[in-house]
């Protein structure tokens, strides 16, 4: 199966800062955040902005920019939209306050009916909307007018692969253009969720990011690049193990790619070990982590953007691999047409 890349776009963190989880946990990590352009013509209205995470806004802007470029050739009623969402709590301190309030409310309740009544009144009215996994997809559809087949995948980096895979299937089997998109907010919540899976969180680095990829089964947009392979593997025993298994070699169609771009590391140590492994497969191995850290579902989108840069420079074939927090590995190969 060959699917043509019409266009690719990615937004990464504008700035990184050292963050400390809480005063009770003396662990700090490097976290990047997105500062969106409020002057963009696609920036959401004030009412929606209140319930949108920053990476959701970034994804919304990216998708609408792509649509604007190709709107005359796209049928938005049939265009597919497949979105990968990362962790879904952006302001942990704010939401922890709500959780504590819930707990105190429950403690003071004398019976079940009273308990649920107090929880209902204690719940902030916008809480659910601010933490919905599928909010990114919903807002993109609302602001772009896309009405085709759609789905949301969450919430590790493997969801980015599945969003791209589903968009490829939509383009190939239904002969319709499809958008794959990813959004990741990173931050304290992400660190607390993901760091327990590793022996060490020293030199931890991740960032908010968003990515968008417009795909087609036809060369009608002057496409110059194509996806020629998609594969992934599972690690069903990861919860019972405490180490990383690198089996990317089993996913590669061959060892003939001009470059290998890899991602998935959360720490410098893991990234270095990934590099040592990848160098054995391809001397021209490139890490996304070095500059951007871990971007969850947006990892593969950033790598595809980097891969297209390399193809523009004269290379012909790029392998892109990723590993999620559960050790599930994925591969996407892109080539010049």
Image (cartoon, grey):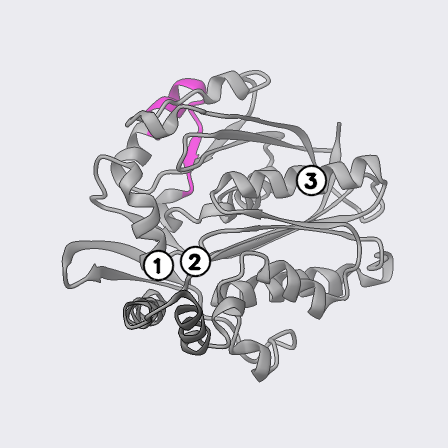
| Residue furthest bottom as drawn | 46
Q: Position of residue 337 (x, y in %)?
A: 74, 33
User: Within 10 Å of the Cα at label 3, are there few (<14), some (14-19), or many (20+) other Cα atoms?
Assistant: many
- On screen, residue 112 versus residue 145, left or right, reads left
N-terminal-most mark, 2 or 1: 1
The stretch in magenta equals 274-288
- Residue pictured at 74% horizontal, 65% vertical: 68
Asked if the magenta segment contains residue 278, the reply would be yes
Distance between mark 2 and mark 1 Cα atoms: 8 Å
- Location of residue 190 with respect to 3 vertically, above or below: below
Q: Is residue 215 left or right of residue 174?
A: left
- Residue at the spot x=41%, y=71% of the render? 119
Please state, as top left, top right, bottom left or bottom right, where the N terminus lies in the image.
top right
> Which quadrant would residue 274 be assigned to in this image?
top left
Ranked by sequence position, the earlier of labels 2 and 3 is 3
Q: Is residue 126 or residue 73 the one in the foreground?
A: 126
Secondary element at tag 1: loop
Residue bearing mark 1:
187
Task: List the residue tagged with mark 2.
Answer: 208
Per the image, the residue denoted by label 3 is 166
> Is any atom of residue 90 visible in this view?
yes
**Residue 22 image position (x, y, % from top left):** 20, 62
Q: Are marks 2 and 3 in contact (CB under 8 Å)?
A: no
Q: Which mark is residue 328?
A: none
- Dot placed on the residue nearer the N-terminal end, 3 or 1: 3
């Amino acid at each position: 199966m060959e699917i043509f890349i019409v266009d690719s776009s990615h937004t990464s963190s504008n700035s990184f800062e050292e963050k400390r989880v809480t005063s009770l946990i003396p662990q700090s990590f490097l976290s990047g955040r997105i500062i969106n352009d409020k002057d963009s013509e696609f920036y959401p209205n004030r009412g929606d902005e209140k319930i949108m995470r920053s990476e959701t806004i970034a994804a919304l802007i990216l998708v609408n920019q792509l649509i604007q470029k190709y709107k005359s050739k796209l049928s938005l009623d049939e265009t597919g939209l497949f979105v990968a969402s990362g962790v879904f709590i952006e302001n942990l301190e704010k939401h922890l306050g709500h959780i504590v309030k819930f707990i105190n409310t429950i403690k003071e309740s004398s019976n079940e009916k009273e308990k649920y009544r107090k929880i209902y009144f204690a719940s902030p009215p916008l809480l659910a909307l601010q933490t919905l996994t599928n909010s990114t997809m919903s807002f993109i559809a609302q602001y772009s007018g896309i009405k085709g087949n759609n789905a949301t995948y969450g919430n590790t980096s493997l969801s980015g692969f599945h969003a791209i895979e589903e968009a490829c299937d939509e383009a190939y089997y239904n002969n319709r253009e499809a958008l794959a998109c990813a959004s990741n907010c990173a931050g304290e919540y992400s660190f607390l969720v993901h760091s327990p899976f590793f022996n060490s969180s020293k030199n931890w680095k991740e960032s908010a990011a968003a990515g968008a990829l417009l795909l087609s089964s036809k060369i009608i947009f002057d496409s110059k690049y194509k996806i020629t392979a998609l594969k992934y593997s599972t690690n069903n025993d990861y919860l019972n193990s405490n180490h990383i298994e690198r089996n990317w070699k089993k996913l590669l169609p061959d060892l003939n790619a001009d470059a290998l771009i890899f991602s998935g590391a959360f720490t410098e140590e893991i990234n270095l070990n990934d590099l040592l492994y990848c160098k054995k497969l391809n001397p021209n191995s490139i890490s996304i982590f070095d500059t951007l850290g871990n971007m969850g579902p947006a990892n593969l989108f950033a790598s595809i953007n980097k891969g297209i840069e390399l193809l523009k420079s004269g290379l012909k074939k790029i392998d892109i691999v990723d590993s999620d927090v559960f050790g599930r590995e994925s591969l996407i190969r892109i080539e010049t047409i």
